[in-house]
Amino acid sequence: MSSPREAIPKSVPHTRAGNCIVLEDLKRFGPDAKCPPFNLAQSQKYCKTLAVRHYENFSVASLLVPRGIRQDFFNVYAFCRWSDDLADELGDSANSLRYLGWWQNQLQECFDGKAYHPVFRALQESIRMHGLRIEPFQDLLGAFAQDQHTTRYPTDKDLLGYCRGSANPVGRILLQLGKVESDQAKQLSDQICTGLQIANFCQDIRQDALRGRIYLPEERWAQYPITENEILAGNASCKLVQAMQDWVRTAQSHLIDGLPLVEHVPRWLARDIQLFARGGLTVLDNISKAGFDVWIKPIEVTRKQKVRLLLQAILRPRSLELTGFRNLDGPITV
């Protein structure tokens, strides 16, 4: 087993709210930790606490999920949270790759029935109960490792290839939890996950630039045209705003195309899909209302919007109606 020995940073610039939880816990549960193994109940409680405390626009394991499966959502979330933070919050790509290698070994040991880390001890039970496959988890880790050496994407096709590893596996795992295996459902899920990923890129373009990453494909730079330095500097010129509007429209299209997934899954899962898909559309709508300028201040979903989304998910889990969202299919304007 690989065992990275570098000191865990005390603080990392541009760390997202809540990520310090994993950084602190790496001292307790990392490769050199001396903490005694958690039992199953302790491990499950740890995953639940991590999911509840960590900031996200929407909770991955909302109260809309049936009680009997809610812990599994917490377990999957905890795996994704640790993976993401090992990739983004250690302040050094080489260090991140070493820890991701250790995490990959932990994943394999989990599927071999030899879990030690609390996240994997809890996840092992979900694997046993639902027959989860290892491939989506491996694909996620592959994308997180890719982030350490790939910081530009020449074309939309290249970025979609990245999304197939960084986002779509999460939807595939949730479909497995819902016992949904149809190819049509998987394709619709991929559309939603890709749309959510691109919406996140639009929302976080400034934060990603601070890490030296640009997810906006280079072929889109030439279309307006804009330069790499303009994106990194975050000067919201007319051309850059136009490029952002077009990218927001692309994300919106993916989410709308995937929304019919709610007709192919159990009612409880349709509620969560509504919450996530419409949450992504709301983020894009807020970017639109801000004039597609995501550099001045963070774009967030308001408390009032979250309540509205939650009520709609509860009351209309199969709805395909999109009233209230801006139509971005018109010409690119400023």
Image (cartoon, helix red, strand yellow):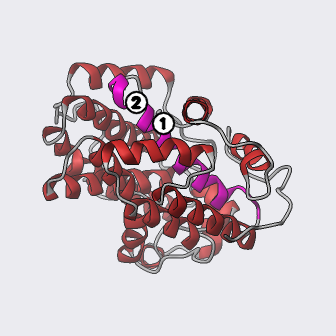
Point out residue 110 in the picture as x, y percentages from the top left corner.
Answer: 51, 55
Task: Give amino acid for label 2.
Answer: Arg
Span shown in magenta: 66-91
Q: Residue at x 52, y 50 (%)?
A: 80
* Label pair 1/2, CB-CB below 8 angstroms: yes
Task: Give amino acid for label 1.
Answer: Phe
Q: Residue at x 40, y 77 (%)?
A: 158
Mark 1 surroundings: few (<14), some (14-19) or many (≥20) residues within 10 A:
many
Residue 254 badge: none
Q: Is residue 330 magenta?
A: no
Q: Is residue 176 left or right of residue 334?
A: left
Point out residue 281 in the picture as x, y percentages from the top left corner.
Answer: 35, 41
Q: Is residue 59 left or right of residue 182?
A: right
Q: Is residue 83 magenta?
A: yes
Dot 1: what SS?
A: helix
Dot 2: what SS?
A: helix
Q: Main secondary structure of the magenta part?
A: helix
Give the residue pinned by disc 1.
74
Q: Is residue 309 above or below residue 199?
A: above
Distance (Cα) linking label 1 and label 2: 7 Å
Give the residue pinned by disc 2.
70
